[in-house]
């Protein structure tokens, strides 16, 4: 999708210098890439290579420093603006992946006039030069950081413009309705009854429905993108660590019959059926005179307070109901899942059971009985649904879409209750501007700085 380059004010003078950075991950690897972008990229590239640069062609070359001493040997590629990732002249050196070698090449480029790139500055220039909109630029980072195959696929959809296209189509339709409403207000002699004929109200209702549909998909995308945090809590020796190992699929936590084995917070990451999951095992919740164990309980409660979901693990058949622990520790009842473990001992069948006003799950962390049902429950509890059309999204996108829905609903109420076309027109204007925040047609320097500062250097 073609994009217009940003204005001179939006660009902030970024055309005036040339940047350089290592574009591959830190550490030792077979291949390392150094990327240069800007008006002097071609000149610097020629100085560092003993081969002539051929546009969009890879050449085997020796890489030299500013004094002509050879640093490395590899491939050099040249992309002339605007046919490059950033929209500027870009030179890439693909050599051996030793950090010292790559750093020498970067320092040679700096000596010849380049400066070190800020995090995300290459992608920022792609945005400012109209190669990507803001949602697509964010999808670059989401793709790099994706924690599951589903998250990667959703990021690719956003990167190729699927999310942006739906937002822009919605914005165009809102603008069209706004023009209709303002025309009816400005030219009353045309006798356009946009309230009575249902044209405006019907179109507005359909727009609200489309916003909610996009918001639902974006919510799923944000879940895939950001993942969730689940904390395992409960009394000592109820099988929290065993449940952690079962969910992970390997022996990560030490399991012992001795109560209080877990003294600290243990965090692991996994893919929960497509959702990036951060799962936290914690110390058993009980009163203790042991100073280390008390600290472990304090840390456990701190993790519980910020978790997206808390699994309260208890031993199946135990005399103490989960409600006692929940009330004693003031656990968040709106984010709780109660798991009755060790059904291999109690003989209880696996699955869900209604107890104490909530669904509780019976499982065996030892044998795996009931675990699949628990996983399905957890995905449903955090709002996940499998959807082949989900695109990656961020919290700021959800906030913007929520505000658009609220503004349109306010306009619809004003139109229905008082026939206030002027108020509706203003709400349509606000909704159109909010959608512009998502793709970057409306943006601030502070927002751009916040977004691109989170990228890795070299991207």
Image: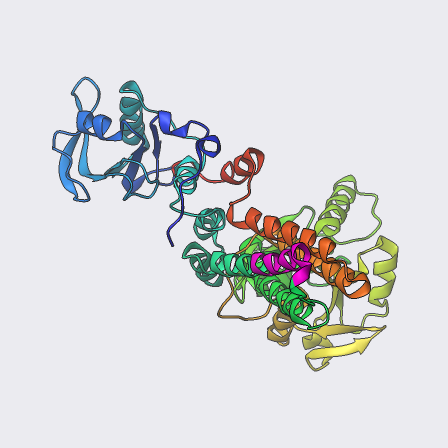
Q: Is residue 426 visible?
A: yes
Q: Is residue 383 visible?
A: no
Q: Height in image: 441 above or below 250?
A: above
Given residues 298 and 16, the one toward you in this image is: 16
Residue displayed at 18% across by 24% down: 47
Given residues 16 and 386, the one toward you in this image is: 16
Magenta-drawn stretch, dominant element (helix, strand or loop) = helix
Q: Quadrant of the C terminus?
A: top left
In magenta, the rendered stretch is 175-189
Q: Residue 224, image x and y in percent?
A: 55, 59
**Residue 274 shown left or right of residue 71 in the figure:** right
Residue displayed at 55% across by 57% down: 171
Q: Residue 152, image x and y in percent?
A: 45, 58
Q: In which image quadrant can residue 372 be found?
A: bottom right
Furthest toward the front, the residue is: 189
Q: Residue 58, image x and y in percent?
A: 17, 43
């Amino acid at each position: 999708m073609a994009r217009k380059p940003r204005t001179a004010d939006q660009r902030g003078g970024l055309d005036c210098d040339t940047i350089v950075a290592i574009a591959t991950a830190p550490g030792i690897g077979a291949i390392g890439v150094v990327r240069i972008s800007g008006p002097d990229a071609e000149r610097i590239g020629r100085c560092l290579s003993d081969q002539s640069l051929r546009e969009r062609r890879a050449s085997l070359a020796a890489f030299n420093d500013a004094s002509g001493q050879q640093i490395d040997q590899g491939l050099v590629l040249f992309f002339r603006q605007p046919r490059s990732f950033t929209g500027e002249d870009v030179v890439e050196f693909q050599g051996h992946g030793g950090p010292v070698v790559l750093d020498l090449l970067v320092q040679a480029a700096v000596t010849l006039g380049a400066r070190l790139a800020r995090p995300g500055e290459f992608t920022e220039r792609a945005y400012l030069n109209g190669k990507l909109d803001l949602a697509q630029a964010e999808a670059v980072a989401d793709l790099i950081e994706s924690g599951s195959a589903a998250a990667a696929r959703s990021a690719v959809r956003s990167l190729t413009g699927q999310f942006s296209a739906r937002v822009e189509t919605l914005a165009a339709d809102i603008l069209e309705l706004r023009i209709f409403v303002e025309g009816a207000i400005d030219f009353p002699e045309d006798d356009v009854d946009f309230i009575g004929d249902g044209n405006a109200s019907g179109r507005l209702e359909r727009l609200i429905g489309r916003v909610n549909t996009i918001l639902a998909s974006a919510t799923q995308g944000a879940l895939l993108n950001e993942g969730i945090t689940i904390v395992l809590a409960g009394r000592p020796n109820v099988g929290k660590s065993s449940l952690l190992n079962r969910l992970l699929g390997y022996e990560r936590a030490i399991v012992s019959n001795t109560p209080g084995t877990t003294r600290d917070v243990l965090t692991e990451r996994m893919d929960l059926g497509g959702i990036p999951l951060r799962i936290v095992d914690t110390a058993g919740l009980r009163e203790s005179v042991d100073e280390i164990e008390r600290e472990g309980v304090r840390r456990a409660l701190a993790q519980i307070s910020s978790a997206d979901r808390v699994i309260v693990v208890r031993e199946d058949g135990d005399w103490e109901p989960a409600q006692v622990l929940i009330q004693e520790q003031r656990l968040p009842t709106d984010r709780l899942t109660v798991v009755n473990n060790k059904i291999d001992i109690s003989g209880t069948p696996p699955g869900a059971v209604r107890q104490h006003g909530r669904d509780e799950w019976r499982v065996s962390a030892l044998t795996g009985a009931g675990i699949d049902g628990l996983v399905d429950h957890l995905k449903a509890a955090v709002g996940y649904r499998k959807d082949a059309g989900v695109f990656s999204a961020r919290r700021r996108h959800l906030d913007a879409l929520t505000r658009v829905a609220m503004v349109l609903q306010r306009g619809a109420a004003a139109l229905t209750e008082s026939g206030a076309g002027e108020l509706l027109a203003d709400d349509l204007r606000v909704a159109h501007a909010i959608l512009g925040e998502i793709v970057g047609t409306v943006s601030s320097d502070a927002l751009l700085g916040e977004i691109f500062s989170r990228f890795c250097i070299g991207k």
